[in-house]
Image (spheres, rainbow, N blue to C red):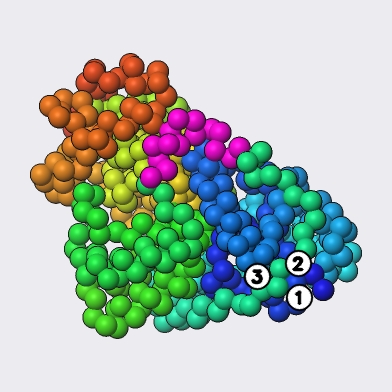
């Protein structure tokens, strides 16, 4: 028989339960569908998804298989392929955002109504959101109790790569005709060297991190110029490596005495906590997590926010962070907090403005982490120390970039001999930005002191 492996964000062979289930049933037909969830992606994540998909297609073709690429609604496409091939089962790995849950529920119902087996599995998370609950049966809204709960559970073991017989494939669309990177324009060539595409690259990243950097991870992870972070958020986003693979490798490092291994596992569980919240609060990317925050006087999109997007605030740490994202498609986690805090607090701009920009620019964009991260920083999210946590970008630079390495790496203006990475910003951004800003220094819209005072006043007004 033929079993369909519906590929979504699981661009790998190892620890892929849907692939294992399909291979156990018969000849495997891999299918990827360009539906509204793909078309709705921002420029950078859509382009990066295309790179990951192309790599997976090549790997499957090297084994004698073929990925069927089709456009349209998932339900209609899968029913059509079932009709064309006589496939008797469809297997996929679950996703947990609102749109994916609605789509998958519809697909499963439609397939079962026609007598087709439809089965989904967990491959994207360590702990499915409904399997972790408080003593009263609710869901966790604070990270630390969540971490303590899952630490006692432990993650399941990765499943082995199966022996696969590939099924003959019906007609397929051409991936190059999809032009998934069209919205990146000239920025694609700048960001591409910073991408680490595919399962082999992801496993190499993990190995290098554990062999070289994990010992310094806890002590140095907040220093953006230090290469001590794993970078695996990019690969996790597209399922080029599984969280279970990372968890057990990190756990082994911890048992071997690696100083930063437990903190690394905590960061992996931070991602889990984000999905835990997203599942139980499906509107997390649009609505404030904390009650009462709908009345907060955030500004909508504005000129200051546009300068923030362009890395032109005149505040060094913030501008360096935004430019790092333009050149590499990613941003150091400490820098993300500083940039987000400055937008939402010093510039009093709605966190959803920043969320949308990151959604467009990050190659490691993740719906849960992006939503929870923005709300956490803005003060309306699951932070035990909410709005009055206002990061001072200059103070953060003094603490975490004391010799200015990170700023020099990304800021060209005012430097006698700008670094190549700093100059790359002008190659990545729209030409109109580069011509307008290359020689003109930016001026802060408001002093850091005044911005902090204004933010705290707004918070006191909200409480009143």
Alpha carbon separation for disc pair 3 and 2: 16 Å
x 65%, y 70%: residue = 18
| Residue 187 is one of the magenta-drawn residues | yes
Say whether disc 2 or disc 1 marks the residue closer to the N-terminus: 1
Mark 3 and mark 1 in contact (Cβ < 8 Å)? no
Q: Nearer the viewer, residue 1 or 245?
A: 1
Q: Which residue is mark 2?
A: 167
Main SS, magenta residues:
helix
Mark 1 and mark 2 in contact (Cβ < 8 Å)? yes
Label 1 sits on a secondary structure element that is loop
In this view, which residue lies farthest toward the left? Answer: 403
x 45%, y 37%: residue = 188
Alpha carbon separation for disc pair 1 and 3: 13 Å
Q: Nearer the viewer, residue 276 or 434?
A: 434
| Picture coordinates of residue 339, whole percent (x, y) | 31, 40
Q: Residues within 10 Å of mark 1 (few under 14, many from 20)?
A: some
């Amino acid at each position: 028989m033929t079993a369909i492996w519906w590929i979504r964000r699981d661009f790998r062979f190892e620890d892929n339960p849907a692939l294992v289930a399909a291979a156990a049933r018969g000849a495997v037909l891999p299918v990827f569908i360009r539906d509204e969830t793909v078309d709705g992606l921002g420029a950078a994540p859509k382009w990066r998804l295309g790179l990951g998909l192309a790599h997976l297609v090549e790997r499957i073709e090297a084994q004698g298989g073929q990925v069927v690429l089709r456009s349209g609604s998932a339900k209609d496409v899968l029913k059509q392929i079932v009709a064309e091939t006589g496939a008797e089962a469809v297997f996929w790995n679950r996703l947990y955002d609102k749109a994916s849950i609605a789509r998958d529920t519809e697909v499963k119902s439609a397939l079962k109504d026609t007598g087709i087996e439809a089965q989904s599995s967990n491959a994207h998370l360590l702990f499915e959101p409904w399997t972790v609950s408080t003593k009263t049966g609710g869901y966790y809204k604070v990270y630390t109790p969540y971490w303590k709960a899952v630490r006692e559970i432990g993650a399941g073991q990765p499943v082995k790569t199966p022996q696969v017989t590939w099924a003959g494939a019906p007609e397929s669309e051409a991936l190059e005709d999809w032009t998934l990177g069209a919205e990146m324009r000239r920025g694609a060539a700048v960001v591409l060297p910073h991408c680490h595409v595919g399962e082999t690259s992801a496993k190499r990243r993990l190995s290098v991190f554990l062999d070289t950097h994990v010992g310094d991870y806890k002590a140095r992870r907040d220093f953006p110029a230090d290469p001590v972070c794993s970078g695996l958020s990019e690969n996790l986003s597209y399922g080029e490596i599984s969280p279970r693979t990372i968890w057990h490798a990190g756990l082994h490092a911890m048992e071997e005495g690696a100083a930063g291994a437990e903190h690394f596992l905590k960061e992996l569980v931070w991602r889990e906590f984000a999905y835990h919240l997203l599942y139980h609060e499906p509107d997390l990317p649009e609505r404030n997590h904390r009650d009462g925050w709908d009345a907060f006087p955030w500004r909508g999109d504005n000129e200051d926010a546009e300068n923030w997007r362009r890395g032109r605030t005149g505040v060094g740490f913030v501008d360096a962070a935004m430019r790092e994202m333009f050149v590499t498609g990613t941003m150091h986690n400490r820098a993300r907090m500083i940039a987000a805090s400055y937008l939402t607090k010093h510039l009093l701009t709605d966190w959803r403005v920043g969320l949308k920009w990151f959604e467009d620019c990050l190659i490691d964009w993740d719906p849960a982490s992006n939503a929870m991260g923005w709300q956490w920083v803005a003060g309306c999210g699951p932070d035990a120390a909410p709005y009055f946590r206002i990061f001072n970008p200059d103070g953060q630079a003094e603490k975490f970039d004391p010799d200015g390495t990170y700023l020099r790496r990304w800021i060209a203006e005012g430097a006698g001999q700008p670094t190549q990475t700093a100059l790359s910003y002008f190659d990545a951004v729209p030409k109109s930005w580069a011509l307008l800003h290359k020689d003109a220094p930016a001026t802060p819209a408001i002093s850091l002191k005044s911005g902090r005072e204004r933010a705290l006043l707004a918070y006191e007004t909200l409480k009143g």
